Image (cartoon, grey):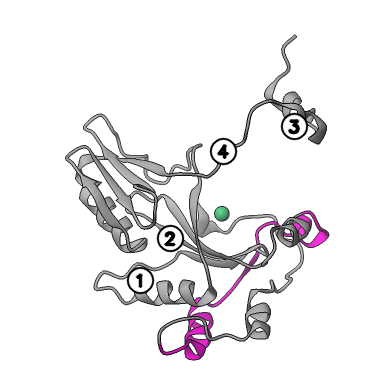
Amino acid sequence: MAPTLNAASESWNEGEKEATPYPSPNALAHVVLRTTPDRYEDMIDFYVRLLKATVTCRGPVITFLRYDYEHHRIAIVSAPEVVRGQEGAVRAGLDHVSFAYKTLTDLARTYVGLRSLENPIKPIWTVNHGPTTSLYYRDPDRNKIELQVDNFDRPEDANEFMGGQYYESNPIGSDFDVDEWAKYILEKAKPDGSEGLTQVEEKALKKRIEVGDRRQLPEVYF
Ligand SMILES: [Fe+2]
């Protein structure tokens, strides 16, 4: 009998993984979002502003956005066949996509910049997950986008935290007051906008405040 996916993944041990003759990807390259024609322009506009992106190629059916070396990180596709998701329904599918920033100051500047736009973009949830400090946004189609900073300098420390008891009892995180957080960080930023926090301040801000058991996502998440 062929193994089910679960059985296969459970039986996948490190030794087998080493022995398999195919590589893992080098990078996660891009995400393509599908929308209805009436939301097409709003979706493009949202992602241009959220990610401070540039349009690589704009067409009536697909638009590609970039913000770094990759020709596109996000693309928006629209077609008359696309129907809007049912209001209030939480359907199975992609939950969210996350973009990482280098420093807390970069993330705080992004938060304040988006909040200060003529049509402000504000997060729906701000949480220290433990491994990341994260701001969650919704696009015009209600897809969630996370903007994050890694809380650990070394991946092995993040892995250790995520394998530890605190994460086991609370894989959701501790919510924080984003206005207070951004004010504190930006008051210390250098005049050119670069990171002004000392290493001690940065470490203290990134450390998750433990709130005990938490296994439910908040209502705003759905
Ligand atoms: Fe995430």
**Mark pair 4, 3: CA separation:** 14 Å
Within 10 Å of disc 4 (Cα), the crowding (few <14, some 14-19, many 20+) is few
Looking at the rendering, the stretch of residues picked out in magenta corresponds to 163-191
* Above or below for 216 versus 181: above
Please give the label number shown on residue 25. Answer: 4
Please give the label number shown on residue 68. Answer: none
Front tag of 3 and 2: 3
**Mark pair 1, 3: CA separation:** 43 Å
Within 10 Å of disc 2 (Cα), the crowding (few <14, some 14-19, many 20+) is many
Please give the label number shown on residue 137. Answer: 2
CB-based contact (under 8 Å), mark 1 and mark 2: yes
Residue, disc 3: 17
Front tag of 1 and 3: 3
Residue, disc 1: 114
Residue behind label 3 places its C-beta within 8 angstroms of ligand 1: no
- Name the amino acid type tagged 4: Pro
- Name the amino acid type tagged 2: Tyr
- Say which element carries label 3: helix
Work out which quarter of the rendered image holds the N terminus and state it: top right
Q: Residue at x 25, y 29 (%)?
A: 81
**Mark pair 3, 2: CA separation:** 36 Å
- Name the amino acid type tagged 1: Leu
- Name the amino acid type tagged 3: Lys
* In the foreground, 146 or 214: 146
**Mark pair 1, 4: CA separation:** 32 Å
- Say which element carries label 1: helix
